[in-house]
Image: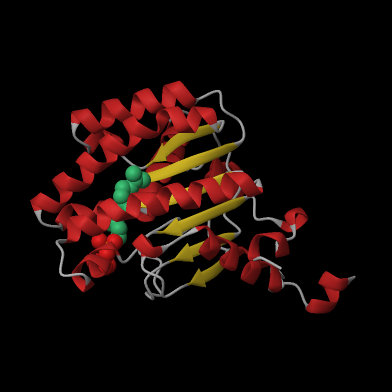
């Protein structure tokens, strides 16, 4: 039986998050510049998006550019931004044909004008799509997001719109960039690294973590199916005992 048909669609994660890693090493292994790896990584983005949408996953969040990525060589940052604009422009039509909505998390006001414009247009053009939401984390870091949420809540308290006692999990979640989205049940990281790297720290409190040695440019639909099957083999206990779960 093929991998896809082994997936139990009734127990699909509603939200999958992916740390796309290994583009640079993939390129280096082929004696090519790092940017070549990023370019190849776009096909993997397409594959992961298609596979998730076909299965019925509601949210797919991809870590495309972290706050820390600004520290890379200027040439690489410029190339990544260019690739982002080109890809977004090229793929808007496909997103619409497949009823996929685009969203971003992160401070996109720090991105080049061109990238901001392409993103805003794509977000506006896909905003009524309802099959799946593709979330790109761009100039994103979880610590930044948590600080922003704290400031938002502190300002509400200062203005007398909120009592500090009202700052509970729901209120805090609502102040995050992922407001309204379910937390990811499954977080995937490629390339053999086993780190979270400042990604969705609040939201992954109970996520299953899946690390694969596959480098991002080699990631295909089958790799997403493998991750989901592994997820479905695990028992999610949320702090309870196995007996409590069974009962
Ligand atoms: C990590 O590999 C990858 C990135 C920082 C960028 C991901 C970007 C893309 C796949 C292309 C554009 C994306 C979209 C959504 C259109 P790395 O460079 O850290 O690899 P390394 O660890 O081997 O150096």
Please report the residue visible at 90 percent of the width from the left and 70 percent of the height from the top: 247
Q: Quadrant of the N terminus?
A: bottom right
Q: How many numbered marks are there?
A: 0
Vertical arrangement, residue 88 with respect to residue 121, above or below: below
| Quadrant where ligand 1 appears | bottom left
Vertical arrangement, residue 186 with respect to residue 176, above or below: below
**Residue 94 seen:** yes
Please report the residue visible at 62 percent of the width from the left and 45 percent of the height from the top: 54
- Residue 58 location in percent, x, y? 61, 43
Vertical arrangement, residue 17 with respect to residue 171, above or below: below
- Residue 229 location in percent, x, y? 65, 67
Lateral position of residue 143 relative to residue 5, left or right = left
Q: Nearer the viewer, residue 84 or 245?
A: 84
Please report the residue visible at 58 percent of the width from the left and 44 percent of the height from the top: 53
Residue reaching furthest to the right: 247
**Residue 138 seen:** no
Q: Nearer the viewer, residue 247 or 14?
A: 14
Lateral position of residue 58 relative to residue 120, left or right = right
Please report the residue visible at 22 percent of the width from the left and 55 percent of the height from the top: 69
Residue reaching furthest to the left: 74
Lateral position of residue 99 relative to residue 211, left or right = right
- Residue 8 location in percent, x, y? 75, 60
Q: Nearer the viewer, residue 151 or 229?
A: 229
Q: Nearer the viewer, residue 155 or 72?
A: 72
């Amino acid at each position: 039986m093929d991998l896809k048909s082994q997936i139990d669609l009734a127990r699909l994660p509603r939200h999958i998050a992916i740390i796309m890693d290994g583009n640079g090493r993939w390129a280096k292994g082929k004696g090519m510049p790092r940017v070549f790896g990023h370019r190849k990584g776009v096909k993997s983005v397409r594959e992961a998006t298609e596979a998730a949408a076909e299965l019925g996953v509601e949210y797919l969040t991809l870590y495309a550019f972290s706050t820390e990525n600004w520290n890379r060589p200027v040439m690489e940052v410029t190339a990544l931004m260019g690739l982002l604009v080109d890809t977004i422009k090229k793929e808007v039509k496909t997103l619409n044909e497949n009823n996929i909505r685009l969203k971003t998390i992160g401070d996109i006001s720090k991105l080049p004008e061109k990238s901001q414009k392409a993103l805003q247009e794509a977000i506006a053009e896909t905003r009524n799509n309802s099959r799946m939401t593709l979330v790109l984390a761009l100039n994103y870091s979880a610590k930044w997001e948590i600080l922003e949420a704290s400031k938002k809540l502190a300002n509400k308290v200062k203005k007398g719109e909120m009592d500090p006692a009202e700052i509970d999990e729901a209120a805090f979640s609502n102040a995050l960039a992922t407001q309204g989205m379910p937390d990811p049940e499954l977080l995937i990281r490629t390339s053999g690294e086993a780190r979270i790297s400042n990604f969705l720290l609040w939201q992954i409190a109970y996520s299953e973590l899946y690390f694969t040695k596959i480098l991002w440019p080699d990631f295909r639909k089958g790799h997403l199916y493998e991750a989901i099957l592994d997820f479905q083999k695990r028992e999610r206990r949320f702090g309870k005992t196995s007996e409590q779960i069974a009962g």
